[in-house]
Amino acid sequence: MNDTENILETLRQRQFRITPQREMIIDALLSGEHHLSAEDVYAQVQTRTSAVNIATIYRTLDMLVEQGIASRTDLGGQVIYAPVGHGPHIHLVCRHCSFVIDADATVLAALDEQLQRDYGFAADLGHISLFGVCTGCKE
Amino acid sequence: MNDTENILETLRQRQFRITPQREMIIDALLSGEHHLSAEDVYAQVQTRTSAVNIATIYRTLDMLVEQGIASRTDLGGQVIYAPVGHGPHIHLVCRHCSFVIDADATVLAALDEQLQRDYGFAADLGHISLFGVCTGCKE
DNA sequence: CTCTTTGTTGCGACTATTTGCAATAACGAG
DNA sequence: CTCGTTATTGCAAATAGTCGCAACAAAGAG
Ligand SMILES: [Mn+2]
Ligand SMILES: [Mn+2]
Ligand SMILES: [Zn+2]
Ligand SMILES: [Zn+2]
């Protein structure tokens, strides 16, 4: 049983209907490249069939994020999607030169616990972006 | 010397030209209400003169964010701007019910230091959003 | 297999934001 | 104050993403 099947099973259990569109979109999401934009997912699905509308791509990606199956990350202009749990790391995005540093997500472990404890909030911290200024850009 | 003047002086020093549009946009940003959308800023500027284009609002807000003078925060659908330093706090946004918890920004102090130390990255953490699942929405 | 229910899709319209470009105006030099 | 340089603006067109709604199809019942 591969990843796509697992996800479909989860969706089935949560009363979502399994459509060919959803299968193809999930396949694309798991396709190896992560950091897929909605357009990337669309392009990849198009290679299989042209019978999928871009609005369905957006709606399905939204649904997958809402269900905790995919992550949505704003890299400052570009919005990317990835399957949750895929090699966690965070993005440090420079607001000045737009350079992106990939950083270890373990820096967030303590924060995660504290938000859970103090606010009962289960934060999705596996693939977030934080904005700021990189070394090169400090005056 | 009020806040608007301070900001204008900073911009002048950084070789930006001071235009009436920029003055009005900065005034709006400092106007008391924070959590202003670009449209809110536009509406407030309109009460003074109708001679400002919405594209200028967007461009100026972008510039203020880039210069570290304003913060841009995505509340999950709504994008809001606020002057940097204005009562720091963070937003915990539930991806399921969209409820927003305002949380103390001090939970980020350790993270801030670590990013600075390990990556030389000066993160803007005073008014960020973190997405996840609130207590009420956990199954 | 057939029918019914209702979630999902495609489509076209619409909103929010961005961009290219020519006209305008801020500001430093003289 | 006047002029020249060049950043900034307005405008209109382009782009990304959202939404309402009618047609469609997945899933469960019989
Ligand atoms: Mn990444
Ligand atoms: Mn706030
Ligand atoms: Zn930088
Ligand atoms: Zn919730």
Image (cartoon, coloured by chain):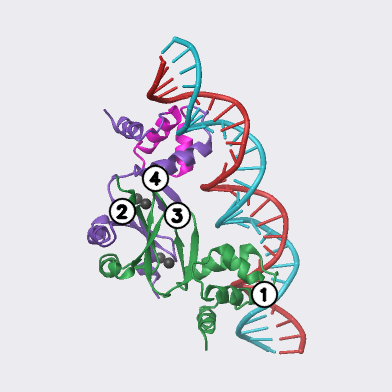
Chain colours: A green, B purple, C red, D cyan
Q: Which residues are magenta?
A: B19-48
- B15 is higher (above) or lower (below) than B117: above
Q: Quadrant for the N terminus of chain B, please.
A: top left
The quadrant in which residue A49 appears is bottom right
Sequence-first disc among 2 and 1:
1
At a point 39% along the width and 66% down the height, the residue shown is B132
Q: Check residue A76 in the rendering and tell me which mark sits there, or answer none.
A: 3
The quadrant in which residue B63 appears is top left
Q: Which residue is mark 4?
A: B66
Left or right: residue C14 compared with residue D9? right
Please state which amino acid type lies under the numbered disc 1.
Arg
Q: Which residue is mark 1?
A: A48
Q: Check residue A32 in the rendering and tell me which mark sits there, or answer none.
A: none
Q: Which residue is mark 2?
A: A135
Please name which of the two marks, 2 or 1, marks the residue nearer to the observer.
2
Q: CA distance from mark 2 to mark 4?
A: 15 Å
